[in-house]
Image (tube, grey):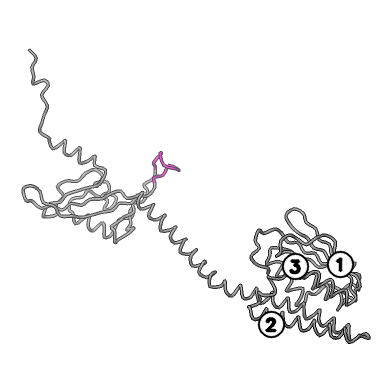
Amino acid sequence: MLNMNIFSFKRKIGRASVKEGFDNLPSAICFADRSGTVVLCNRLMDSLCHRLTGADLQHISELRNALENPAEGAETEDGKSHIYRFHSEGGKEDQPGGEAPDTFWQFTETQITDADGREYTQMQAIDVTQLHLKTMELKEENRLLDEANIRAMKLYEDIDRIVREKETLAMKMRVHDDMGMCLLATRNLLTKESTLEEYLQGARRWQKTLEEILAADRTTGKEGISTVDPARALDELLEAAGKMGLAIEVKGALPESERKAYMMVVAMRECTTNALRHAGASQMTVNLTRAAGSDTLTITNDGIPPEGEIIEGGGLSGLRRSIENMGGTMKTEGRPRFKLTVILPDTGSEEEIL
């Protein structure tokens, strides 16, 4: 008959079993009696206390003091949440570079009472490294978002000013060109024998120009600018230039983009004014080409070449700003004859002219 005592199990948990289970807890924990003497401390808490104090933990006050003034290997990370950073001790082969990363532990102190009514102080530390690092990442992302929001708010505040400046520039360019054409037409009338009908036509041109300027001013510069049909504007330019003795030959077609087409007509109008006023030209040649996602405009005339370097005045400088605002480039040459080259790339936007 088998001895059943061989298969009996020890039902009573001993002190060693309790200590082993206590030591294997994932959190650091210790207990102190009413006098503050530490009566139970697991291995993890013992290790942290050594990092904080450099000695074994005997009294709960030692731990409290160490948390108030951490030793060199640790520091307070968040005093309000009682989170402490424990610096890397190094030498961990499983860590990048052979060095262990810093860890973060959150300490809490609570009062407990056992089944016999005895009171103890429980000090517990939980590893919050991953949570803390994620929190720091989130704070950094929020900081970057706040900075982006500040920049966005600044941009929003500047939008109205930028729009007004661009609209004002557009209106000034239109006024500059239209007034220039009217002045040239008037000078042409006064320097030759003109009929009454020609004078009346000149007066009507002035009236039309002034009405367009006033209409543009009443609508903050956009009316009469973005609504202008480029093809119609080009036809009017060719007709007006022809009446003043400048024949304009256009080779190629305006871009399909109304925005770019209008800007090229603006460039032609500026060159027409300069060709009549400064070069005494009778012929102006315009080439319109398209290649590799961009449209190119070149303008030359048969007038007197500029003397020396070309100095861009109000008209050309305003034209350059508008072209560069569209992402394009503008180049002027004086020899062997005047030449203007404008390149406008595709942008995919038709929302604005200038």
Indicate the quadrant containing the N terminus: top left, top right, bottom left or bottom right. top left
Point out which mark residue 300 bears. Answer: 1
The magenta region covers 91-100
Q: Nearer the viewer, mark 1 or mark 3?
A: 3
* Residue found at the far left of this picture: 116
Residue 99, quarter of the rendered image? top left
Residue 97 is a magenta residue: yes
Q: Position of residue 225 (x, y in %)?
A: 69, 73
| Overall secondary structure of the magenta section | loop
Q: Position of residue 344 (x, y in %)?
A: 73, 61
The disc labelled 2 sits on which kind of residue?
Leu
- In the displayed structure, 324 sits above or below 135; it is below
Q: CA distance from mark 1 to mark 3?
A: 20 Å
Q: Specify whether 47 is left or right of 18.
A: right
- In the displayed structure, 204 sits above or below 65; it is below
Q: Residue at x 88, y 83 (%)?
A: 198
Q: Nearer the viewer, residue 236 or 170?
A: 236
**Residue at image mark 2:** 214
